[in-house]
Image: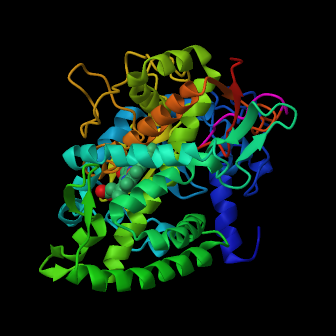
């Protein structure tokens, strides 16, 4: 046994969590399995498969998580992970109940996100949360959003137009040197990385001249969220943003600016101007609080929507028959968006803390424990969605209509869990759906108008371990998606 007290605790922890103590060690290599199959991590005497918590840090879990989530749902629906000092809740019904119970499962400061994003509503519960939640929410939903649809379409058309007039971002398009009617386009660089940020900057009322600087702040803050060595850059970028926003706040407190619809009629103050005049508990919001709100809206709406657009095109193009039907009937893009988020959401789940002891499936989670609510797993729970690994835009058991806070529609169909449910349901859900659906419709129409056939450029798109098949999406979003665009002969 090690003499250092820290190592003693670690040794003890690993011994407790390790079904095969002789293999103890904080890291373990897991074999990379064919997608959909789990490697054997040992069994109890009655044959119940075990989960080794070191799995969660492995490359295998990143690319092939779903067979392991199935084992957890079926055999360890509340998994006590003594290595990471938390509990994993993986069944749809339990995740849903936890999100709806804002008192028993409270939100908590989320590690580095707190340092980088600042104090945001993500970390508040109960009345405190309700007071701040609705500060600007109306801009992201309902009539105010409907009136901004032409602006979203216009932003999409502008970016997609650049693919054909030589102004696309560097490195995003490669034209075939032998046949200029064929080109490859990286959908992320050419569209999805920036489009959601442009939309959100616009609704925030962020000045045009600061936009390029804003992309730098945004990507530094996002890179800093993981608590990695880039964390200090993230915190630095947040400070720069706050300095910039302080001046903006001073101006907008005196002279608010407005959003206009396509006809030039005012829709209302932009979000920043709205926040500048908002009084909470008798006080105007400080520049720090306003910066945190900006950081949250942009941080919450950038990577997530980027991932939704990329994953949707990736999955549809691998299911050509479904893609052709969606292209033929643009109203189906909404169902494609929701089925994508069910099958491969860009956010895995949310942490919660237990406010008191909770016993679930025979496991007592002590008060104050960290509980990982796993949205990825809930979305693949066959207690709710039949044949859950299958991507099917036409599945009858998924609610694909208007987003509902309760998570269940009148016909008993459940929503996917990618936006959460209950009090913290993503307030950007509607706008991200509009961005993904309208952006995809504009793109499909631009291709149709030019008689262009689209497919996946398999040579350039990341591969799985066999070096030939396309990489599975795994946890989160695919890194890049190269499309082939081929003009049909006239
Ligand atoms: C596909 C895209 C998106 C996904 C998958 C997503 C997912 C989520 C999830 C799961 C939560 C709940 C967090 C919790 O329960 O603690 C959340 C919260 C939030 N999201 Fe999104 N989001 C997306 C797009 C957006 C967009 C476009 C915006 C802003 C324009 C946004 C802004 C927010 C904010 C402000 C919160 C905090 C809500 C609260 O705590 O009350 N999100 N999002």
Q: How many labels, in total?
A: 0
Answer whether residue 111 is visible to the viewer in this image: no
Which residue sits at x=24%, y=26%? 409
Please state the horizontal and vertical placement of residue 482, each as a whole percent of the image.
70, 38
Figure check: 265 above or below 402? below
Where does the magenta region start and end? 466-475
Left or right, residue 390 beside residue 14: left
Residue situated in front as seen by the camera: 349 or 4: 349
Classified by dominant secondary structure, the portion drawn in magenta counts as loop
In the rendered view, how is the structure colored? rainbow
- Give the residue displayed 78% in from the left and 40% down from the top: 175
Which residue is most to the left? 282
Residue 33 is left or right of residue 453, and the answer is right
Q: Quadrant of residue 295?
A: bottom left
Residue 82: image location, x then y, percent: 57, 54
| 36 vs 7, nearest the viewer | 36
Depth check: 380 or 167 in front?
Answer: 167
Whether residue 320 is visible to the viewer of this picture, yes or no, is yes
Relative vertical location of residue 379 with respect to residue 272 in this rendering, above or below: above
Whole-percent x and y of residue 77? 46, 36
The quadrant where residue 313 appears: top right
Quadrant in the picture for the C terminus: top right
The quarter of the picture where the N terminus appears is bottom right
Rendered residue at 26%/51% (across/down): 261
Decide whether residue 400 is among the magenta residues. no
Please identify the residue farthest to the front as the structure is shown: 490
Query: Residue 298, position in %: x, y?
Result: 43, 61
Residue drawn at x 24%, y 37% as measured from the top left: 406
- As drawn, is 188 to the left or to the right of 440? right
Is 89 or 386 nearer to us in this picture?
Answer: 386
């Amino acid at each position: 046994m090690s003499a250092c007290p820290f190592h003693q605790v670690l040794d003890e922890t690993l011994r407790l969590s390790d079904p095969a103590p002789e293999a103890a060690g904080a890291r373990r290599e897991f074999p990379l399995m064919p997608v959909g199959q789990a490697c054997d991590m040992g069994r109890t005497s009655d044959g119940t498969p075990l989960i080794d918590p070191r799995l969660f840090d492995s490359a295998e879990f990143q690319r092939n998580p779903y067979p392991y989530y199935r084992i957890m749902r079926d055999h360890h629906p509340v998994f006590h992970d003594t290595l990471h000092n938390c509990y994993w809740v993986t069944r749809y019904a339990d995740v849903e109940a936890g999100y709806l119970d804002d008192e028993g499962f409270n939100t908590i400061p989320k590690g580095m996100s707190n340092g980088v994003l600042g104090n945001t509503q993500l970390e508040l519960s109960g009345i405190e949360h309700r007071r701040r939640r609705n500060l600007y929410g109306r801009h992201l939903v309902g009539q105010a959003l409907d009136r901004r649809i032409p602006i979203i379409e216009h932003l999409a058309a502008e970016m997609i137009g650049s693919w054909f007039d030589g102004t696309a971002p560097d490195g995003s398009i490669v034209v075939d040197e032998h046949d200029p009617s064929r080109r490859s386009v990286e959908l992320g660089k050419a569209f999805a990385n920036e489009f959601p940020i442009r939309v959100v900057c616009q609704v925030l009322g962020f000045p045009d001249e600061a936009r390029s600087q804003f992309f730098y702040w945004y990507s530094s803050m996002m890179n800093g969220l993981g608590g990695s060595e880039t964390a200090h850059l993230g915190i630095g970028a947040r400070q720069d943003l706050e300095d910039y926003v302080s001046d903006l706040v001073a101006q907008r407190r005196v002279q608010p600016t407005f959003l206009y619809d396509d006809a030039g009629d005012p829709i209302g103050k932009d979000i920043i101007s709205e926040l500048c005049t908002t009084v909470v508990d008798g006080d105007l919001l400080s520049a720090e609080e306003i910066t945190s709100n900006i950081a949250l809206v942009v941080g919450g709406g950038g990577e997530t929507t980027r991932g939704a657009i990329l994953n949707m095109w990736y999955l549809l193009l691998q299911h050509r028959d479904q893609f052709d039907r969606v292209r033929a009937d643009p109203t189906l893009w909404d169902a494609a968006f929701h089925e994508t988020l069910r099958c491969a959401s860009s956010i895995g789940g949310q942490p919660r803390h237990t406010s008191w002891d909770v016993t679930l499936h025979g496991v007592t989670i002590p008060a104050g424990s960290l509980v990982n609510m796993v949205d990825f797993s809930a979305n693949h729970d066959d207690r709710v969605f039949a044949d859950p690994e299958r991507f099917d835009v036409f599945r009858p058991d998924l609610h694909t209509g208007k987003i509902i806070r309760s998570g269940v529609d009148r016909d008993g169909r459940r929503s996917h869990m990618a936006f959460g449910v209950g009090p913290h349901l993503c307030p950007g859900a509607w706008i991200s759906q509009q961005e993904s659906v309208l952006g995809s419709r504009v793109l499909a129409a631009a291709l149709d108008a030019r008689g262009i056939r689209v497919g996946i450029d398999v040579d350039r798109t990341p591969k799985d371990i066999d070096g030939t098949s396309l990489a599975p999406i795994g946890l989160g979003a695919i890194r890049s998606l190269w499309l082939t665009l081929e003009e049909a002969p006239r």
